[in-house]
Amino acid sequence: MDLLVEAYLDYRYRDSGDGVPHHGMPPSPSDDDGQRVSLSEIELIDIFTRRRLSLRSQPHHQYPNETLIHHGYLGCAPLYPTVAISLRTLAAYCQTHRVCPTFSFQAQCKTLCFLHDIPYRPYLTTQLSGAFDVYLQILQRINQRLCTALKCDTPNWRLLNACPACFYKLEDEPDLDFDWLVTMDGNNSLKRWDSTIYGTNAQVDSRKVRSDFWIDPNTVDKFNSEVRAHAVSDDALVDNMAVETNPAPFSCADRWKNAGPEMRKKMFSVFDESGIFIAACRHRFVLLACDMIRSGELAKYPLAIIDKLLAVYGKGGACAYDIGCAFTKTLGNSSLGLRAHQLGFRLMVGAFHGHAHNRKCQLDWHPMYIPGTGHSEGEGCEHIFSASNALARGTRHASTFHRHQVIEQHFAFWNDDKYAALSKIFSVCLNHNANIHKAIFSGTTIVRP
């Protein structure tokens, strides 16, 4: 892979602007042709062209894919490729999938088949997928080199610098009520089908996730036993309090499935991963994610998220969760309870879900009545899920690795878009404030939009 990365950087250096590399001077006749890799009659697939050519390698090339990348292509096999996809075709699919997450490998492969007047075959999708995996791995290794050169490879660097508006501290900046404010929630759209239900063995894929978005299942399971130990007593306590204090049940926990007993949070056995649980900052940058495995929204998932958030961001934090009122008790009874209390961690209920809570609950937990929340509605995860739900059709039958790869790539694109939108939000605020000042000095009545 290191050799392919070097070949790709050389290709980008020679890129003439349209994805076609400029080859420069031909190799010297004195080069030892007997030791050089050559490719004969390899099928080269571009967006609008399909042809067979023989390619000559450079003297320093050791593998066929180095030669292919030198010419602007990437093979569909590591050592003996017979078909190669152009790098600009892979780049075009990457950006198309960015703006249209429902556009799958199969759709891209069928598009190429129709353009080249050949019948579609399922194995062609496998070839395209294999080349795209290597393409993303090359880009990821280049990004690692950039992070190392820019000294952005320290532990938790991405989390500490994900959102400048949230996590950058200015000199002499006044203290806020909350040093950091996040929202977290679970989503069941990104399930993954268990392939063993068809009577076949699951495909073995030893590749692991490449980003630090994910909290691994072993870390999540640390909070499994302690939650289960308190599940029955907590729910019994909530029910008893509701009966003793009001003739009519008052508890908000009865309305929410994820606030009920752990034993009720089941999922159909046909799914291996039943969804994801994420955390995002108030400006909707995705910070963390974990898989919900063969279960509903168990308490161990938000506990694992909170554990990581407290470890990275420290004191003065707050988090909006749709059952923040009931989950406060779960958090207090867990092993994180003392640390969360010492760090001043505060839970609240998002504004959207808050309307389904009773009035007394809203007075204590709704962000409208909590100083320091500003205009944050605490429902950033719902905005994120509205976009990530489009990935479901491509991840339902994917392997574990490919499902993670698609989700983390989508989250990376999402964060890039949110980073670009920060300046737009800031400029809108400046224009709004400028209009207010202008209206004040001119004596004009201000009408709030």
Image: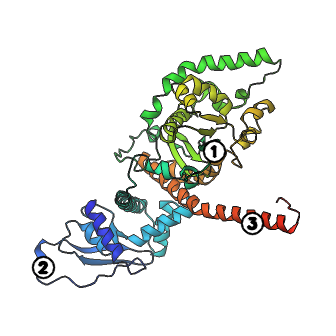
Residue under label 1:
176
Relative height, residue 398 to residue 36 (above, below): above
Q: For marks 2 and 3, give the CA distance.
A: 69 Å
Question: Which residue is more in the foreground, 226 or 69?
Answer: 226
Residue under label 2:
31
Relative height, residue 202 to residue 145 (above, below): above
The residue at the point 12 percent across, 79 percent down is: 31
Measuring from the top left, give residue 73's x and y in whole percent. 34, 71
Measuring from the top left, give residue 166's x and y in whole percent. 58, 50
Q: Is residue 262 visible?
A: no
Image quarter of residue 328: top right
Circle 3 residues within 10 Å: few <14, some 14–19, many ≥20: few
Measuring from the top left, give residue 111's x and y in whole percent. 50, 69
Image quarter of residue 216: top left
The residue at the point 77 percent across, 39 percent down is: 355
Residue under label 3:
434
